[in-house]
Amino acid sequence: QVQLVESGGGLVQAGGSLRLSCEASGRTFSRLAMGWFRQAPGKEREFVAAIRWSGSSTYYADSVKGRFTISRNNAKNTMYLQMNSLKPADTAVYYCAADTRVVPGHEEYEYDYWGQGTQVTVSS
């Protein structure tokens, strides 16, 4: 079992920045691929970014490429999502997820464990 807890969400103006954190416990974090997803009101949950267990490879949705950066600190059992140049369209509940495979997926069903989510609201 893996427990995931997100933090760092909040209200920010368009053009601003936020850094989300996801702290993991219960299983060797360094062996887990990790991802971020988000769900806006009335929409399905969508892939945002993912990172291999080693941090050697990262993956991004086209909508956030160049603005968001995913990273991890295995010594702290924590993953991050640095979000810059935020837009109102980024408003959503952001979820972190853990994938027990080597290469993280881009689909919900590929992830085994999920956090409860943290709200990000970007005002115009």
Image: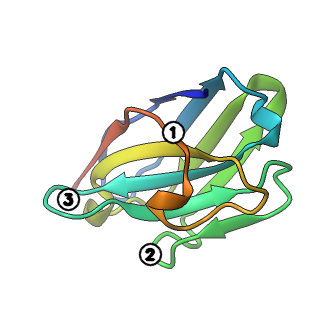
Left/right placement of residue 95 relative to residue 13 reads right
For the residue pair 41 and 87, the one nearer the viewer reads as 41
Left/right placement of residue 89 relative to residue 101 reads left
Left/right placement of residue 39 relative to residue 81 reads left
**Tag of residue 20:** 1
Q: Quadrant of residue 21?
A: top right
The residues tagged by marks 3 and 1 sit, at their Cα atoms, a distance apart of 20 Å
| Residue drawn 38% across the image and 32% down it | 116
**Tag of residue 124:** 3
Crowdedness of circle 1 by 10 Å Cα count: few (<14), some, many (20+)?
many
Left/right placement of residue 15 relative to residue 20 reads left
Position of residue 19 relative to residue 83, above or below, is above
Tag 2–tag 1 contact (CB < 8 Å): no
Q: Which residue is mark 2?
A: 63
Q: Amino acid at mark 3?
A: Ser
The residues tagged by marks 2 and 1 sit, at their Cα atoms, a distance apart of 17 Å
| Residue drawn 43% across the image and 44% down it | 95
Crowdedness of circle 2 by 10 Å Cα count: few (<14), some, many (20+)?
few
Quadrant of the snapshot with the C terminus: bottom left
Q: Amino acid at mark 2?
A: Ser
First of labels 3, 1 by sequence position: 1
Whole-percent x, y for residue 96 in the image: 51, 43
For the residue pair 68 and 23, the one nearer the viewer reads as 23
Q: Quadrant of residue 31?
A: top right
* Front of the two marks 3 and 1: 1
Whole-percent x, y for residue 101 in the image: 73, 55
| Residue drawn 24% across the image and 57% down it | 40
For the residue pair 85 and 27, the one nearer the viewer reads as 27
| Residue drawn 63% across the image and 58% down it | 50
Whole-percent x, y for residue 103 in the image: 74, 63
Position of residue 82 relative to residue 43, above or below, is above
